Amino acid sequence: MTARPVSPETPPVFDLRSLRGSALDEFGRHFESEGYCLLSGLQDAVTDLYRPVLMRNTGLSRAELETLLEPDAKDLVLPVELRQKLSRVVTPDDLADSLVANLRPMLARLLGPMVHLSRDFHTQFKCGATGRVGYGGYDSKQGFMEVHGAYQLHQDFTGASIPTSPAAVILWTGLNECPDWPVRIYPRSHRLGLLCRKFVSVDHAGLSQFGEPMEIQARPGTGVIFNSLLLHGTGTAGPGRRVSCDIRFFPSCPYLQSPIRSLVESPGAFIEERMASETGETLRAPLLENLAVAGQLGDNVAAAPYSILNWANYLNDVCNGDPDRASLHISRFTNSEAGLDSAETYIEQFHGRPMQPATVARIRNLIGSPKAVAVGTT
Ligand SMILES: [Fe+2]
């Protein structure tokens, strides 16, 4: 793992293979405080799982794929058909099952007892062939050049087209070794609430208020997992081609249609146990969101302005209280001082979006409250 922290302290690197007991506690504390954790020991558990999926999806042989992974390739721009196939790779069930099995303790600590995986994952072949990309997703009109484009800064939660959960996490892993086009993150920015709906230029004058960024270079077997409120994008340019995969994991989320996978045997008991010991807001947030959707949260929780806990209160009012009042929690979640977009922007983006009745029923069933009644699910 090569990281270039601007701060004097070198961040810890957590080895996935020993992430249990006190190491998992330390991992959780670092994630809570900084909004990310650097990881090693991902080769067998994550990195190697992507290759057969990419080969299947693109029709490339192993040797052809290896050629694409060379950081100093002459032809940096891939053919458009290949860019299209790589831009969004459907997450096959066998990959999802293996990732959940291999990452189970870490995911349960970060997301609570239930998880959705993103339906697709992104493979990025960053190089200098195109300019900065200032929007989410992929656009056929752009010829899927996003596969190569360096991203402007954004938060995944606010950059998405539908509400998900601010407690979601992104796992970014290097597929080749390349010092160029690292991931740039702003540690601790996950505590600042909703900062930007639109992508922000990496050169934006207001960025100093978010502290010093940190850059994480691609190296197989290593990666970074970060909270979906963390401000991030692509870092320093260079001549090489950096290859990485990123996939998103969500706590149980009423807006998603994708299947929920249970990480533990008894989700209700797991939430109770974790709530009794966890004090950090970022790690309590998904548990409180679970309870809100299950109709078991009761009164709204204390949530300071910008706090991630405002989202649990939003869900609680939508599901169990007064949906008309719920948007107040989005306003409270909006960072009106350092942020670049208004509360109205996020209310328009998130409020009144349909929940998925089957997903809501499944969450309640897993937590053990199938009789809870909710509104706002249409
Ligand atoms: Fe992102």
Image (cartoon, helix red, strand yellow):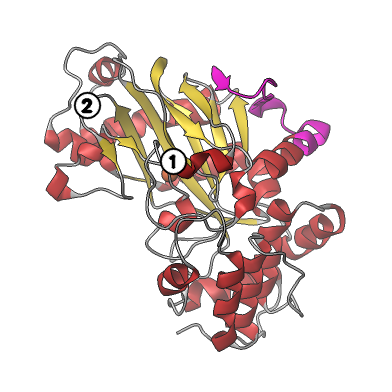
**Residue 79 colored magenta?**
no
Q: Work out whether residue 306 can be spotted.
A: yes
Image check: 358 left or right of 66? Answer: right
Question: Could you say which is closer to the camera, residue 50 or residue 13?
Answer: 13
239 in relation to 182, above or below: above
From the image, tell me which residue sits under label 2.
Answer: 60
Q: What kind of element bears circle 2? A: loop
Q: Quadrant of residue 310?
A: bottom right
Q: What kind of element bears circle 1? A: helix
Image check: 31 left or right of 153? Answer: right
179 in relation to 204, above or below: above
Q: Which image quadrant: the N terminus? A: top right
Q: Quadrant of residue 267?
A: bottom right
**Residue 20 colored magenta?**
yes
Question: Could you say which is closer to the camera, residue 153 or residue 296?
Answer: 153
The residue range painted magenta reads: 1-26
x and y percentages locating residue 349 in the rendered image: 41, 69
From the image, tell me which residue sits under label 1.
Answer: 205
